[in-house]
Image (tube, grey):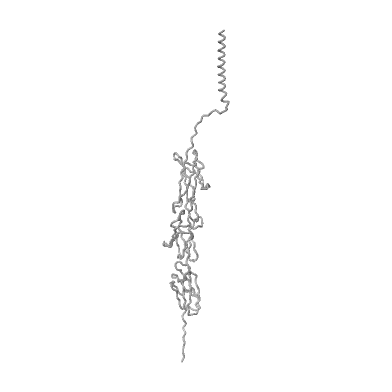
């Protein structure tokens, strides 16, 4: 009697896990593909909450696990190549995915300080709101934004600032921190001078002014035009400290040259700009200044100069001659009387 023994090899079993890099938990939603040494596709699937099992892979052959599409909020992992071993044990391969990371800064256009108090919103390509927050002292950090395009919008700017324009940015397929910066500009001031005749209200051309800061430094020199107007450039409305509005700026308007035929205005006009809102980038202040005409010249009577002998000799001489004549006439009269008496 003879016996024939037949040995059947058990099929190989490979367990493929797609996990979160941080938690180690199975990550559903990733599209995966397994190819052989010739690049032929062996199997394709979408990850779930359980590992994916593949049986009967050829012992000694190499296979490559590739992620063709990551789960939302994750970056694509690098491919894994492995060789099937001759064992009945379950052979495990783990592919880890890291999340996308975005850092959003809200800073002053003049520096790198984070601006506190700005209300911000991120929307996706379909206009859906995916994140809202109020800015603080540190950049805002977001994880798990799906790869794609987004819009960053400032809903409200802090005191002293103007709402920034929207920014469109794209979350790339990478686990590196992606940085997005939105800068806020400060509100500005503009001074408009209106120069007129105090009595008639007529516009006065040619008046010159100096606009000085609180320390007396000349910020700008202005001259009125034929309409009596002069307009300054853009001016700081205040000072800022650590990304916050600190205090209002004070300026002084001083007339340095009056229009022809007018008296100088001696008033030192204080100028300040009051912040309106985050939708008003330029705050205009009108400073009205009037001038009085110079008084007209009146004719004057000229008096003789003190000590001018030329003007005094003639009347003195006349007085002497008149006195001498009177004396002579008196003497002659007395002589006639004496002769007649004899």
Q: Is residue 25 above or below residue 285?
A: below
Q: Is residue 222 above or below residue 14?
A: above
Query: Farthest residue in the bottom direction?
Result: 1
Q: Is residue 119 above or below residue 94?
A: above
How many numbered badges does the structure rendering display?
A: 0
The image position of residue 80, as x and y in percent, is 50, 72
Which corner quadrant of the image does residue 30 belong to?
Answer: bottom left
Q: Is residue 90 above or below residue 313?
A: below
- Image quadrant occupied by the C terminus: top right
Near-viewer residue (163 or 169): 163
Near-viewer residue (150 or 25): 25
The image position of residue 214, as x and y in percent, is 51, 48
Near-viewer residue (266 or 107): 266
The image position of residue 283, as x and y in percent, is 45, 50
The image position of residue 89, as x and y in percent, is 48, 79
Near-viewer residue (257 or 267): 267
């Amino acid at each position: 009697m003879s016996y024939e023994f037949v040995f059947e090899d058990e099929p190989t079993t490979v367990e493929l896990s797609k996990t979160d890099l941080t938690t180690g938990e199975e990550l559903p939603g990733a599209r995966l593909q397994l190819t052989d040494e010739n690049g032929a596709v062996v199997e394709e699937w979408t990850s779930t909450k359980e590992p994916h099992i593949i049986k009967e892979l050829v012992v000694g052959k190499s296979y490559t696990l590739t992620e063709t599409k990551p789960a939302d909020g994750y970056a694509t992992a690098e491919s894994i190549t492995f060789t099937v071993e001759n064992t009945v044990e379950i052979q495990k391969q783990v592919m880890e995915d890291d999340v996308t990371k975005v850092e959003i800064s809200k800073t002053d256009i003049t520096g790198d300080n984070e601006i506190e108090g700005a209300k911000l919103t991120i929307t996706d390509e379909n206009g859906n709101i995916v994140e809202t927050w109020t800015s603080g002292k540190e950049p805002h950090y977001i994880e798990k934004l799906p790869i794609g395009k987004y819009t960053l919008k400032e809903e409200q700017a802090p005191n002293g600032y103007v709402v920034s324009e929207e920014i469109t940015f794209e979350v790339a397929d990478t686990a590196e921190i992606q940085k997005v910066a939105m800068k806020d500009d400060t509100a500005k001031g503009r001074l408009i001078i209106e120069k007129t005749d105090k009595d008639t209200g007529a516009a006065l051309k040619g008046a010159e002014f100096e606009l000085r800061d609180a320390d007396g430094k000349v910020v700008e020199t202005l001259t009125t035009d034929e309409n009596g107007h002069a307009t300054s450039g853009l001016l700081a409305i205040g000072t800022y400290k650590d990304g916050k509005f600190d205090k209002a700026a004070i300026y002084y308007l001083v007339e340095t040259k009056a229009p022809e035929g007018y008296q100088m205005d001696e008033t030192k006009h204080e100028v300040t700009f009051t912040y309106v809102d985050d939708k008003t980038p330029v705050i205009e202040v009108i400073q009205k200044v009037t001038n009085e005409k110079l008084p007209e010249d009146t004719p004057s009577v000229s008096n003789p100069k003190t000590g001018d002998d030329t003007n005094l000799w003639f009347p003195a001489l006349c007085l002497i001659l008149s006195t001498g004549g009177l004396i002579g006439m008196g003497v002659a009269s007395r002589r006639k009387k004496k002769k007649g008496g004899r």
